[in-house]
Amino acid sequence: MTADFNRIITLLRKERGITQKQAAEDLGVSQALLSHYEKGIRECGLDFVVSVADYYNVSCDYLLGRSPDRSGLTLNVEDIPSPESSKDSIYKGSVLPILNKKLISNSLNILYDKLSTCTDKGLVSEVSVFLMLAVYKMFRLLYGANAKNSSDMFGISQKLYKGYSCAAMDIAETNVEAILSGVSLGNAPALKDVSSLAMTTESLSKDYPLYATSLFNLIKTSEERIDKPGK
């Protein structure tokens, strides 16, 4: 069984809001056995995988971590909606840049839509600052790779921008965490209600049918990179 299986069946149960005892009864196994499956202590048989897939209305490929989408969809770049009308042919036939661009852009659509449900303008501002700084850093690396490009385009020196931009991103991320935890920054009232940020894989798929698959794939790709840095 894949390493993702125990995490996913636990996630699905918690998203549905049912106890381990109830899920075990519904699936026809003991609570102790389901607990072992959720903790990865024991491996289940194929019949149980199919039962769980039917119970939570997901695909077996999703349960086994073969697809990040509940339906088991495997993405092709042509299947992902483009968030803007720009031509993707500029990549001259290379599929990976087009795919990654769509995953990021579509995921940002969900991120900003969720932000729009919050009343704190500072939250949107700090999230935007963090993302803009990330783009700034990557663009500057590309720009600086060619010695013919003039450094006068930037107001912060080459020796300072990396450390300063990382620090600014850390500050923005800290401010986001503070706002979401109910800390008031500046003159803005504290954010007290985050109920609009309640999410499940099912609700995301339903609310964002065009973009949710992109987000799920972005999460999977990101975590694969985090687990295996430098590869």
Image: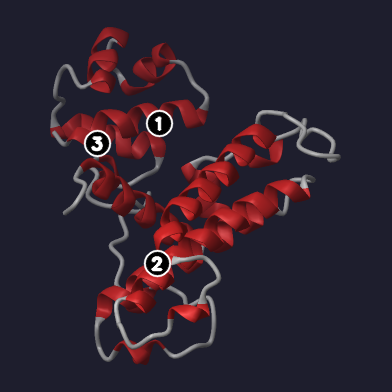
Q: Amino acid at mark 2?
A: Met
Mark 1 or mark 2, which is nearer the start of the sequence?
1
Tag 2 residue:
138
Separation (CA) of disc 2 from disc 3: 31 Å
Residue 211 in view here: no
**Snapshot quadrant of residue 129:** bottom right
Q: Nearer the viewer, residue 50 or 126?
A: 126
Q: Quadrant of the C terminus?
A: bottom left
Looking at the rendered image, the quarter that the N terminus falls into is top left
Q: Nearer the viewer, residue 186 or 117?
A: 186
Q: Contact (CB < 8 A) between labels 2 and 3?
A: no
Give the amino acid type for the residue marked by disc 1 in the picture. Answer: Leu
Q: Earlier in the sequence, mark 2 or mark 3?
A: 3
Say left or right for 61 vs 160. left
Kind of residue sitting beneath label 3: Asp
Image spot of residue 3 (x, y percent): 19, 34
Q: Quadrant of residue 158?
A: bottom left
Residue at 40% across, 11% down:
21
CA gap, disc 1 and disc 3 = 10 Å
Q: Which mark is residue 11?
A: 1
**Can residue 14 be spotted in the picture?**
yes
- Residue drawn where x is 49% and y is 68% of the image: 105
- Helix, strand or loop for disc 2: helix
Compute the Cα span from label 2 to label 1. Answer: 34 Å
Q: Residue at x 28, y 52 (%)?
A: 67
Of helix, strand and loop, which one carries label 1?
Answer: helix
Up the image or down, 70 lies above or below 21; here it is below
Looking at the rendered image, the disc whose residue lies closer to the viewer, 2 or 1, is 2
Return the mark for residue 54: none
Q: Is residue 23 above or below residue 60?
A: above
Label 3 Cα crowd, 10 Å radius (few <14 / some 14-19 / many 20+): some
Q: Which mark is drawn over residue 4?
A: 3
